[in-house]
Image: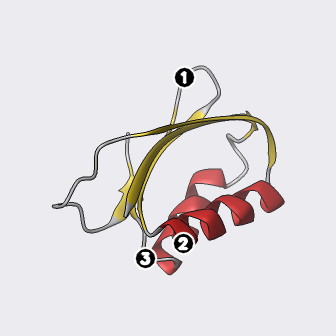
Amino acid sequence: MIRKHIYFSGYVQGVGFRYTVIQLARRFHLTGWVKNLYDGRVEMEVQGKNEEYECLMQAVKNQFEITQIQIKDCEIRLTENEFDLKW
């Protein structure tokens, strides 16, 4: 089990990025959240099996024009049970 905190830069707002990430994360049985930031980036925390996380990231990279991704490991949240939009 892994948990990652991620910032996406590029053409990621106003293009269905969050909606797509939510659908993909749920399909891959990942938990966490995604939200837009005021500086034009998208922030996400995602948790689950590494293989499913890699599938999510590959799908996102293939569908959107991302110029930079910043990733750091973070602490697992055992009580989390869904992936959703955060405001």
Q: Nearer the viewer, mark 3 or mark 2?
A: 2
Q: Secondary structure at mark 2?
A: helix
Amino acid type shown at disc 3: His
Towards the viewer: 85 or 56: 56
Amino acid type shown at disc 2: Glu
Contact between labelled residues 1 and 2, with CB atoms less than 8 Å apart? no
Residue 83 lies left or right of residue 8; in this view the side is left
Q: Secondary structure at mark 1?
A: loop
Q: Quadrant of the C terminus?
A: top left
Q: Residues within 10 Å of mark 3 (few under 14, many from 20)?
A: some
User: In the drawing, what numbered circle is on residue 52?
Assistant: 2
Mark 3 = which residue? 29
N-terminal of the two: label 2 or label 1?
1
Rendered position, 60 above or below 68? below
Residue 70, percent across and down? 61, 33
Residue at figure coordinates x 51%, y 77% from the top left: 28
Q: Residues within 10 Å of mark 1 (few under 14, many from 20)?
A: few
User: In the drawing, what numbered circle is on residue 38?
Assistant: 1
Residue 32 in sight here: no
Rendered position, 4 above or below 39? below
**How many numbered markers are drawn?**
3
